[in-house]
Amino acid sequence: MKRSIYYSEHLENSILPDYLKAFHSDKVKKNCASFIAAICDYCRRDFLNIDALHAQSYFNYLSFSNHDGKKLALSTIQLKYSTLHAFSNYLIRNSGSLKIEYSANPFDKINFQKPDPYLNASKVPTPEQINSILQRCESEPVLYSAISLIIKCGFTVGELLKLRQDSFILDDCNHAAVVFSYRDTQRYVKIPEDVLSVLDYYWKNQTNNTEYLFENKSGRPMRVRDIERLYKKCMGTYFQFTLSDLRSACIALLCASGVSAKELGKYVGIQNYSWLRRYDKIIPELSLAPCDYSNLIIKPPSAQK
């Protein structure tokens, strides 16, 4: 594991090894040791001698400097922060048994960029951009079908790749749905008629009798990276929205159509309905009324020509 030349003997041989023993995951241990060593190297002092000014300087460095030619993701900076803050709290709680003088957490008042709770409208494709994306995917039936399910039903990529052909059910009124089971609860996701026609076209053109809805050329279930690579290949230079962005577009369109937060949360699998407030900012910017959403119809590739 990474260590710093600035460690005191007590920290290196006693405090840090005992602290790391509490973690079962080797990856967590390695990350924790690396984060602690990194700040000690930057501040050029033992961790026990780092004060609030040193800590703030380090996070300024992480936030505004380039690292290997690019800036660190905010999630990475937050992970480093929570790790160092937790270690400092450990030192405070156990200062007596550790025989150290350590009474204040230097990371308590760190000021660094906080994530915007709202989605940016520029990261959510418009209906026109969605149509362009679908047109570029016409030659790939797997991708066209997958994106149709994301755009109209709000599936995550992980959910898509778990779908089997027998995952779909029909009720007495010929309404199609997919059933997801989570422990002792079930979630029913209705499949709109336009998406059902896309899937019907996809199934009829399948040459093999496949178990999973989306399989690779070897007959195995596609992995997340498989479909992401295929998507990027189809988009080429037009690639500007991720598959996750397409799901955000689905949820934004449903919000704009007037669906209640409770109904929408159940449909797309969001248990904490307050999370949907992150779409509040983009709905006015899309300027969509419910009638606009009803006009968003996806057709099988052959019907596009």
Image (cartoon, rainbow, N blue to C red):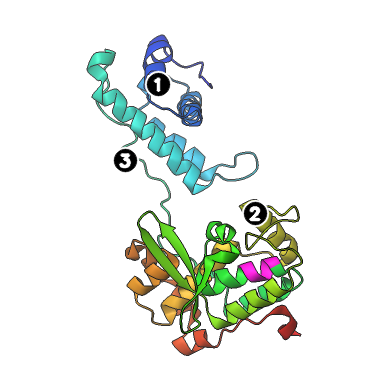
Task: Return the x and y of residue 28 as percentages of the image width and height.
Answer: 47, 31
Residue drawn at point x = 62 percent, y = 45 percent: 70
Of tags 3 and 2, the one toward the viewer is 2
Label 2's element?
loop
Mark found first going from the N terminus, 3 or 2: 3
- The circle drawn on residue 109 is 3
Q: Main secondary structure of the magenta part?
A: helix
Q: Secondary structure at mark 1?
A: loop
Asked if residue 281 lies left or right of residue 103, the reply is right
Q: Indicate whether residue 250 is drawn in magenta.
A: no
**SS assignment at label 3:** loop
- Viewer-proximal residue among 97 and 269: 269
The magenta region covers: 142-146
User: Type of residue at label 2?
Assistant: Pro
Which residue bears the numbered disc 2?
Answer: 221
In space, the residues marked 1 and 3 are separated at their CA atoms by: 28 Å
Q: Is residue 66 visible?
A: yes
* Foreground disc of the pair 1, 3: 1
Residue at (48%, 48%) from the top-left corner?
A: 74
Image quadrant for the C terminus?
bottom right
Q: Nearer the viewer, residue 195 or 210?
A: 210
Q: How many marks?
A: 3
2 and 1 marks in contact (CB < 8 Å): no
**Of label 1 and label 3, which has the lower sequence position?**
1
Residue occupied by mark 1: 21
Q: CA distance from mark 2 to mark 1?
A: 38 Å
Instruction: Tell whether label 2 touches label 3 (CB within 8 Å).
Output: no
